[in-house]
Amino acid sequence: MDLSFFLTPPVAFLIFVAIVYASYILGSILTAKSRANVGGRDEVYACGEDVRPKTQAVNFLQFFLFALFFTIIDIVALVLGTVSHAPIVLVIAYLGAISLGLYVLMRKEKAGTKHE
């Protein structure tokens, strides 16, 4: 029997998913069962004092825009690195569409930072 069949990506992925699911089920069986909320169990505690949470609005917009920008640039590099026999007109149209998308993204980022 040829065992290389099990090394093909779809089969290996399904085997991996089955192993992870089995370990998840086994872990849920072996863990201690939790009781209902026992007086203050879910409350924040530090040095014997109640902690008052500070309300602070965290703005992740710039981080997500940067992550999106990085992802777009990374995919563009991947696509341009792998198009060897594509017509030049298609490559130029692709670069134009990506440039337009990045321009809109950068304008939106500047507009989003003015309101802070």
Image: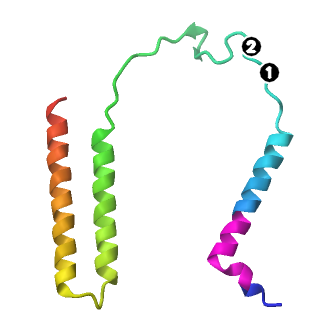
Task: Check the image and report above or below for 65 versus 99.
Answer: above
* CA separation in Å, label 1 and label 2: 7 Å
In the rendered image, residue 25, in percent from the top left (x then y), is placed at 80, 47
Mark 2 crowd level (few <14, some 14–19, many ≥20, 10 Å Cα) = few
Q: Which residues are magenta?
A: 5-16
Identify the residue at the far right of this view. 30
Q: Quadrant of the C terminus?
A: top left
Q: Camera-side residue: 46 or 91?
A: 91
Displayed quadrant of residue 18:
bottom right
Tell me the residue that label 2 is attached to.
38
Task: Check the image and report above or below for 113 versus 25.
Answer: above
Tell me the residue that label 1 is attached to.
35
Asked if the residue at tag 2 contacts the one at tag 1, i.e. Cβ–Cβ closer than 8 Å, the answer is: yes
Q: Main secondary structure of the magenta part?
A: helix
Left or right placement of residue 85 versus residue 50 in this view: left
Task: Check the image and report above or below for 53 versus 62.
Answer: above
Q: Residue at x 82, y 37 (%)?
A: 31
Q: Residue at x 19, y 44 (%)?
A: 109
In the rendered image, residue 22, in percent from the top left (x then y), is placed at 79, 55
Mark 1 crowd level (few <14, some 14–19, many ≥20, 10 Å Cα) = few
In the rendered image, residue 53, in percent from the top left (x then y), is placed at 46, 15
Is label 2 in a helix, a strand or a loop?
Answer: loop
Is label 1 in a helix, a strand or a loop?
Answer: loop
- Amino acid type of disc 1? Arg
Total number of numbered discs in the rendering: 2
